[in-house]
Structures are given as structure tokens and as C-alpha cells.
Amino acid sequence: MGRAGGEAGADAGACELTGRDGRTALPAVLRRVLGGVRGVLWWFDGVLGGQDYQRYVAHLRRAHPGRAVPSEREYWRERHAEAERNPGARCC
């Protein structure tokens, strides 16, 4: 009986490391960690304005279909120039 109990204890520990299909759960843990890292990167990208140009282009195409779409470089140049002209629109 001691042997069966010992085997059950070993099996219980092994179950924690394996998924339902018998493969190790480590890839599932890594997927969750990578998902969290992607979420943090997405948040920083949004805070820093990484998607602003794409949103601007979508707005132009939706609201002003005949208007020329500036290059990304032109967009950022104009955006920074506007920030310099209107310093009240920023925090610092």
C-alpha cells in the first residue's frame, strides 16, 4: 500500500507539469507570459503614439476621401511642428 501511495504522489506531481493531452504545460505558461508581454508593449505603443499615423490615415480615408494622404514622415513632422506652435496642448 505504501508503494501505491508513493506512486500516486509522484503521478500527482507529474499532472501539474502536463496538460490534458499529456504534453508539458510549459508552452502554455510561455504563451501566457508572452501574451502579457505583448499586452504591455501594446499599451506602451498606445501611450507613445505608435498607432497615431494609422488612425490618422483611416480618418482621412473615411472622412475626407478626396484628400491626399501624407507620408508618415510628413505626418510626424507636421504633428511636432503643431506641438511647437501650440505648447498649451501638451503637459510639459
Image (cartoon, rainbow, N blue to C red):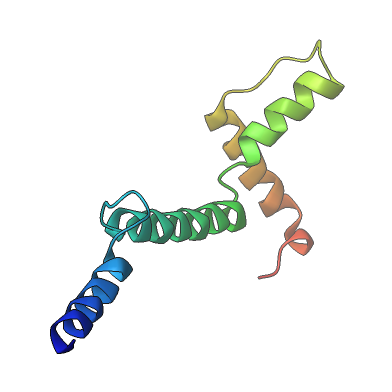
**Residue farthest toward the top in the current orientation of the protein:** 66
- Rendered-image quadrant of the C terminus: bottom right
**Image point 70% across, 69% down: which residue?**
91
Which residue occupies the foreground of this view, 13 or 6?
A: 6
Q: Quadrant of residue 50?
A: top right
In the depicted structure, whether residue 24 falls above or below residue 75: below
Which residue occupies the foreground of this view, 30 or 72?
A: 30
Q: Quadrant of residue 76?
A: top right
**Residue farthest toward the front in the current orientation of the protein:** 1
**Image point 39% across, 55% down: which residue?**
34
In this rendering, position of residue 2 left or right of residue 81: left
**Residue farthest toward the right in the current orientation of the protein:** 63
Q: Position of residue 29 (x, y in %)?
A: 36, 61
In the depicted structure, whether residue 13 falls above or below residue 41: below
In the depicted structure, whether residue 70 falls above or below residue 32: above
- Rendered-image quadrant of the N terminus: bottom left
Q: Position of residue 17 (x, y in %)?
A: 27, 66
**Image point 58% across, 38% down: which residue?**
77
In this rendering, position of residue 23 left or right of residue 33: left
Q: Quadrant of residue 14?
A: bottom left
Q: Position of residue 8 (x, y in %)?
A: 24, 77
**Image point 60% across, 52% down: which residue?**
46
Q: Position of residue 69 (x, y in %)?
A: 68, 19
**Residue farthest toward the left in the current orientation of the protein:** 3
Count of marks overlaid on the render:
0
Which residue occupies the foreground of this view, 30 or 57?
A: 30
In the depicted structure, whether residue 35 falls above or below residue 88: above
